[in-house]
Image (cartoon, helix red, strand yellow):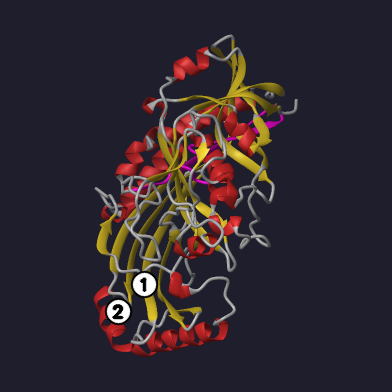
Amino acid sequence: MIDHLETLAARVAPGDVRWTLRAVDETSETLSVRQDVAEPPQRSRDAGVMVSVAARGGLGHAATADLGEAGLADAFARARAMAAAVAGRMVFDPAELPAAAERGRYDGAVQRPVNGAPLRERLDLLREVCASAAADERIVDRHASLLAVQASQLLLTSEGGRTEQHWHVTMPHVQATAHVDGVTQTRSSAGQYNGFCQQGGLEVLERASFRGEGARVAAEALELAMAPPCPGGEMDVLLMPDQMMLQIHESIGHPLELDRILGDERNFAGTSFVTLDMFGHYAYGSELLNVSYDPTRSDELASFGFDDEGQLARRTLLIENGILKRPLGGAVSLSRARRQRPDLEGVATSRAAGWNRAPIDRMSNLNIEPGRSTLDEMIASIELGVMMRTNVSWSIDDSRNKFQFGCEWGRMIRNGRLAEVVRDPGYRGISATFWRSLAMVGDASTFEVMGTPNCGKGEPSQVIRVGHASPACRFSRVAVVGGHA
């Protein structure tokens, strides 16, 4: 498809205006076993092209799944007509955008592609994992699944830019539900919304310890079903990486999206408590908080070499020693924001959910940098608190400020020692106040690479893959929300 489109683009792309052509070809396969019964495999392929044209002060987009010459020519014509229709009515001048002249190739890390293993072998593995969760009759439901995605993308531009990128994504998942004396609890391998997802192939299953997850989640589901409710009140919380993932996502990632700060998402996904004048001096968290945008980490879910506007992607800090430095804003939003803040710096993070969507500001890989504390040191420092793992619910206001999150699993910490397991733990807070309560950051031994395949935003809606990596973190004097007896 790539060679074919390059030839056609040279033939039909307009020669008198700026343009981009972005082609995406993605295949996916979902295998699932529930209660030891294999469900029908789900397979799909989605391929098409988005073209953009900037002309006379306007910018237009058009998409097509017709990859022939007529289909491509029609898409360019529609994009040009849209650019003409909005010329002079846009909130920025497309002529101000940087040239997309980067050339290069990015190949995501993969050692053993999932589809290289026979289908029977993959289903047998899922049956094995699912069966291992059936250790007790009080386990009333159990489920193991595997989602594998292969994607290729080509971006061509009128400035001579050409970037080609290829990815393999693997998402294993295990879940078990226990019912004991009227109490039902579900435990999952990394969140009921598939939090352990990385780039790579079958090697991802080894990093996830997939074969042993069925027995573990079943045992912990039973433990939770027999555990007392989490007590409420003000105390310390020790959040493990699979909960830190959601905390980063909702109360750092979304508030720092520049188009949201500029008001673009107001009537769908909301705004942000962050304003343009905060960058460079605002204390977003304690001095222990260092947050990186890192699309270069090979195993993380949203790693890439170039964003979907053709800009070269580089690792950089968004928050350094607690101080807010820069937003998650690509070329279009940055052009607009610099009218108010000429010194503002952005990052290459304009991304689209597929071939029929235009790029917008998105989180990519958003990580908390490891600190110096061991897990034992953090536990020992807590007189009264709760260790929490694995997000199960979230609620946050439209400005991504006030929040309340629930977790699958909790364990009390008393006098510097781990104590009883508790069910239905949760906590609430206000984003900046919460991050300023960050008291200890785990070292590299506590650091884990997680992610989410289902981050929604935009009109029309775009659901995209995002990576988050984090160590365990301790927060002081947090409002813990207890469960119910």
Q: Which residue appears at 65% of the width and 29% of the height?
A: 425
The percent position of residue 85, horizontal first and vertical second, equals 56, 85
Question: Is label 2 in a helix, a strand or a loop?
Answer: helix
Which label was assigned to residue 410?
none
Which amino acid lies under the numbered mark 2 shown in the image of this protein? Leu
User: Which one is earlier in the sequence, the residue at label 2 or at label 1?
Assistant: 2
**Front residue (pair 309, 43):** 309
Badge 1 local density, few (<14 within 10 Å), some, or many (20+)? many
The percent position of residue 219, horizontal first and vertical second, equals 52, 27
* 256 up-or-down from 57: above or below: above
| Quarter holding residue 5 | bottom left
* 346 up-or-down from 282: above or below: below
9 relative to 465 in the view: left or right: left
**Front residue (pair 271, 90):** 90
Q: Which residue is mark 1?
A: 23
Q: Which residue is mark 2?
A: 5
Which amino acid lies under the numbered mark 1 shown in the image of this protein? Ala
Q: Which residue appears at 70% of the width and 22% of the height?
A: 234
Please say whether residue 185 is visible from this viewpoint. Answer: no
Question: Is label 1 in a helix, a strand or a loop?
Answer: strand
* 14 up-or-down from 221: above or below: below
Badge 2 local density, few (<14 within 10 Å), some, or many (20+)? many
Image marks 2 and 1: residues in contact by CB distance under 8 Å: yes
Q: Quadrant of the N terminus?
A: bottom left
The percent position of residue 111, horizontal first and vertical second, equals 24, 48
**Front residue (pair 428, 65):** 428
What segment carries the magenta color?
173-199
Please say whether residue 166 is visible from this viewpoint. Answer: yes
The percent position of residue 473, horizontal first and vertical second, equals 51, 27
Residue lying farthest bottom?
70
